């Protein structure tokens, strides 16, 4: 019955005791530096990967296994409110707000994030110092019944709280129904196995990081489902004046990943985007040039505006910004006004969008 669930608990999760308070720690020895993270299995996998890389670079200072890097679990608003879509309750910042507070209060020295959850603007006194090598950025379609979402018949249900995914699904198959579908990866796969929905989409990167990619029915290429800005990237946020922590974290930075993600976030910032809006954007470096694709859609998928750029890697921020400006000009400011009204006025992700403003 559990065809879509992992066969055994994840070993890296069992090392963390349950958080009875807002913050819990996995280390008993006095740490040299303190890592802050959400408590989901995927977030912990990313935290352990970060600690492993630090230990490889600084074994004498941080321990050969990272014994002197404590992992501190911080419960976030996004983790605690799962009954509603992110677009209804404030967007992606709900996964980082409490981490920001802990960082600024010096309860932790740095925070490890899934970059697609990080708002375009960070609190004063903090910045993103490093990004780890990026995982596969594509989305994965998962279903025990169908091979693609295009072939799903009228009335079937796909679970996704992402307006970006919903819009691209409806553009190709407007007859199916999308419903709010949140929770960690294991929870979503359990709901799928229990036939709460007929299919779902998840980021392939998270599945790979938890050794769960064998549950994937089909990996969706960019022309089938353009991924979210910064999808597949792990970012590390620090206090800008913390020279001690900066010494360790700056050594982790993967330059190509950070260049591509910063290009994508420049696009997002130009469009004032968040989880409240159906925006997608991806950059990659090919033969010494940076290639960018981005889109903005109406939530019902009836309108999609796209932009593409190829240019010098040194112009990565300019490329993202100009792609965003092109879409803003083509779509018109009324489109974005209607889009904002839409996500404020309806219960996003619970039913197929029908609001007239989305069709203007």
Image (spheres, rainbow, N blue to C red):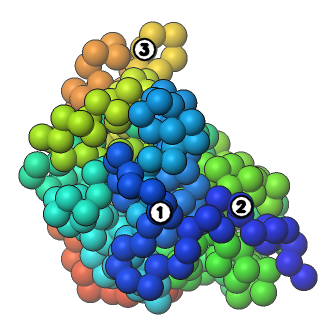
How far from the left and from the top, in percent, is residue 24?
42, 72
Q: Nearer the viewer, mark 1 or mark 2?
A: 1
**8 or 119: nearer the eye?**
8
Callout 3 touching callout 2 (CB < 8 Å)? no
What secondary structure is marked by label 1? Answer: loop
Marks 3/2: CA distance? Answer: 40 Å
Mark toward the start of the polypeptide (3 vs 1): 1
Residue topped by disc 1: 28
In the drawing, what numbered circle is on residue 289?
3
Secondary structure under tag 2 reads helix
Q: Position of residue 176 (x, y in %)?
A: 64, 77
**Mark 2 sits on what residue?**
11
Horizontal relation, residue 122 to residue 297: left or right: left
Element assignment for label 3: strand
Decide: few, some or many residues near mark 1? Use Cα within 10 Å; few <14, some 14-19, many ≥20.
Answer: few
Q: Quadrant of the N terminus?
A: bottom right
């Amino acid at each position: 019955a559990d065809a879509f669930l992992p066969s055994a608990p994840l070993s890296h999760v069992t090392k963390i005791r349950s958080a009875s308070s807002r913050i819990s720690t996995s280390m008993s020895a006095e740490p040299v530096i303190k890592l802050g993270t959400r408590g989901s299995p995927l977030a912990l996998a990313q935290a352990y990967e970060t600690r492993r890389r630090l230990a490889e670079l600084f074994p004498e200072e941080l321990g050969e296994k990272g014994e002197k890097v404590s992992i501190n679990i911080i419960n976030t608003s996004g983790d605690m409110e799962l009954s509603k879509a992110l677009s209804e309750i404030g967007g992606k910042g709900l996964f980082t707000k409490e981490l920001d507070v802990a960082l600024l209060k010096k309860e932790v020295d740095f925070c490890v994030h899934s970059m697609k959850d990080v708002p375009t603007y960070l609190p004063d006194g903090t910045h993103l110092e490093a990004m780890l090598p990026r995982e596969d950025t594509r989305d994965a379609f998962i279903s025990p019944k169908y091979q693609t979402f295009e072939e799903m018949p009228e009335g079937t249900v796909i679970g996704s709280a992402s307006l970006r995914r919903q819009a691209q699904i409806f553009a190709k198959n407007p007859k199916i129904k999308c419903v709010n579908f949140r929770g960690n990866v294991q929870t979503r796969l359990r709901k799928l196995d229990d036939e709460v929905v007929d299919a779902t989409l998840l980021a392939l990167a998270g599945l790979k990081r938890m050794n769960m990619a064998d549950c994937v029915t089909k990996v969706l290429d960019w022309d089938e489902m353009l991924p979210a800005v910064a999808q597949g990237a792990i970012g590390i946020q620090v206090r800008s004046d913390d020279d001690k922590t900066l010494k360790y974290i700056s050594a982790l930075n993967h330059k190509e990943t950070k260049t591509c993600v910063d290009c994508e976030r420049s696009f997002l910032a130009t469009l004032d985007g968040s989880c409240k809006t159906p925006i997608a954007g991806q950059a990659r470096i090919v033969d010494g040039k940076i290639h960018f694709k981005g889109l903005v859609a109406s939530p019902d998928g009836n309108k999609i505006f796209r932009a593409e750029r190829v240019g010098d890697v040194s112009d990565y921020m300019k490329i993202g910004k100009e792609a965003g400006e092109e879409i803003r000009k083509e779509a018109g400011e009324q489109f974005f006004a209607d889009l904002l009204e839409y996500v404020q006025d309806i219960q996003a992700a619970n039913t197929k969008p029908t609001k007239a403003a989305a069709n203007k």
